Image (spheres, helix red, strand yellow):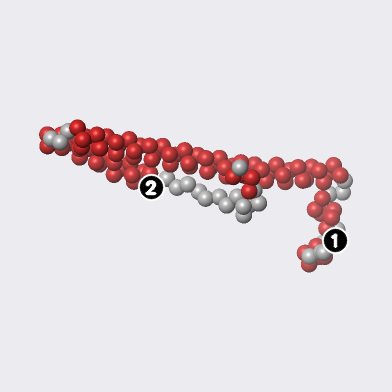
Amino acid sequence: MAFNKDLKRKSPMTDDYGTSLEEAFKNNMEGTTAHYQAILFMYKQLHDAVIKKHAQELEVARIQGKLELFHELFNMSAMSEEKEKLESELVLAEAKASDVKVPYIDWYKLNEPQMFD
């Protein structure tokens, strides 16, 4: 079934695929290559964002662990400067962790459900 756009063109098959098999193969190969390069680029961005988010979450967990250890071992007021320093580092690390955004890519909408396998 032809669409209105196809009916307005003089030769829709030639416009889409070319005049020879070699030209059709080349056009489709370029389209396929561009498609998968775009998918790999999106996946690389997603992977890099997940790694950054994980690094920030590790930093937050490290500082929280220090604070918990500080509360368990040292309940003295003489160490209050160190405690305040750790608490300010924790607030800063949590702010950095919340700034890192991980993009959501709907692979099913892009017709690439195998990306979840």
Q: Is residue 110 left or right of residue 64?
A: right
* Label pair 2/1, CB-CB below 8 angstroms: no
Name the residue: 66% across, 43% down. Answer: 36
Of circles 2 and 1, which is in front?
A: 2
Q: What residue type is disc 1 on?
A: Lys
Does 78 appear above or below 94? Answer: above
Which residue is located at x 66 percent, y 51 percent? 111
**Number of other residues with Cα within 10 Å of mark 1, as a class: few under 14, some 14 to 19, many 20 or more:** few
Quick check: can you spot residue 77? yes
What amino acid is at disc 2? Ser
Residue 112 vertical placement versus 64 (above, below): below
The residue positioned 20% from the left and 37% from the top of the image is 71
- Mark 2 nearby-residue class (10 Å; few <14, some 14–19, many ≥20): few
Question: 69 or 38, which lies in front?
Answer: 69
Name the residue furthest bottom: 4
Residue beneath disc 1? 10
- x then y, percent, for residue 70: 22, 34
Q: Secondary structure at mark 2?
A: helix
Q: Label for residue 98?
A: 2
Tell me the quarter of the image containing the N terminus. bottom right
Provide residue 74's location: percent of width, then percent of height: 17, 33
